[in-house]
Image: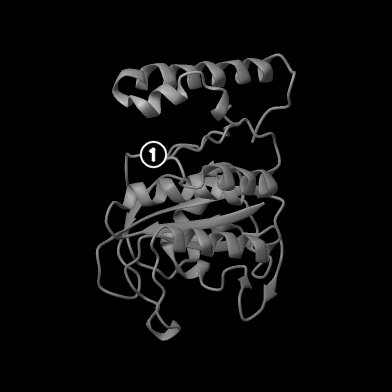
Amino acid sequence: MVYLSLGSNLCDRFAHLQLAIGLIRYRVGKITAISSLYETPAWGFESTPFYNLCLAVETSLSAEEVLKATLEIETYLGRERLPEKENYQARTIDIDLLFYAELEMNTPALELPHPRLHLRNFILIPLVEIAPNLVHPTFKKTIVQLAEESPDEDKLNRLEQAMKQPKHHQFIAIEGNIGAGKTSCMHLLQEALGGTVLAENFFNNPYLEDFYKNPEDFALQVETAFLNDRVAKYQQVLKGEVKRPI
């Protein structure tokens, strides 16, 4: 089990956190618990208050792989990193790896447990909700005990908004203009994730030639034919004639 702390204080804070949760579900593993959402003062610098929460995630990735995935998610969501000495800054998303099971490690890239989690209420209070009896492997104290002993005097405002638990979808749909690279993207996803490709029978569409000659008159027919083809493929999946796609 891995525990993560998420924060955002730029633009649509709620949306950034919800997007990050969805990407964590896809890239890291199954989310088993999501804390309440809290508005908290910026820690270490003057800025817009943060929205913060904690997650518990089941993962088959190593700690280093989890770190790599979360850093890539931050970058995808617009996180810009400054030099370490200027690291206290506003950000669209911040994802901290707090615990990875009972692992203790200290490398230039990653320190576990997070070295400052016991000093920060915006981590401890949400974490108490989802893992009150989790024992810090270094301090030999539960999260509840660490929260009670926290020297942080910041007050958190618990918000009524709740994050949605991401659903596990069995399909990835790829759409785009002709020539945009949909087929190449589809095969790259298949290579990465496994599963079955359900591609359109593009050249078997009986209205395609007419569509290119007269798009306005044949747009509905050509799209209806593509839709019927998709329905037929999905029926094959439901009947067990092909394995479920990615």
Residue at (62, 46) in percent of width and height: 189
- Is 173 positioned to the left or the right of 43 in the image? right
Residue at (33, 26) in percent of width and height: 215
List the residue tagged with mark 1.
Answer: 162
Position of residue 13 measured from the top left corner of the image (x, y, whole percent): 32, 53
Position of residue 82 measured from the top left corner of the image (x, y, whole percent): 39, 79
Res 242 quadrant in image? top right
Mark 1 crowdedness (10 Å alpha carbons): few <14, some 14-19, many ≥20: few
Position of residue 245 measured from the top left corner of the image (x, y, whole percent): 66, 31
Three-letter code for the amino acid on which mark 1 is drawn:
Ala
- The residue lying toward the viewer, choosing from 235 and 79, is 235
- The residue lying toward the viewer, choosing from 145 and 215, is 215
Quarter the C terminus occupies? top right
Position of residue 151 measured from the top left corner of the image (x, y, whole percent): 43, 71
Q: Secondary structure at mark 1?
A: loop
Which residue lies most toward the front here?
213
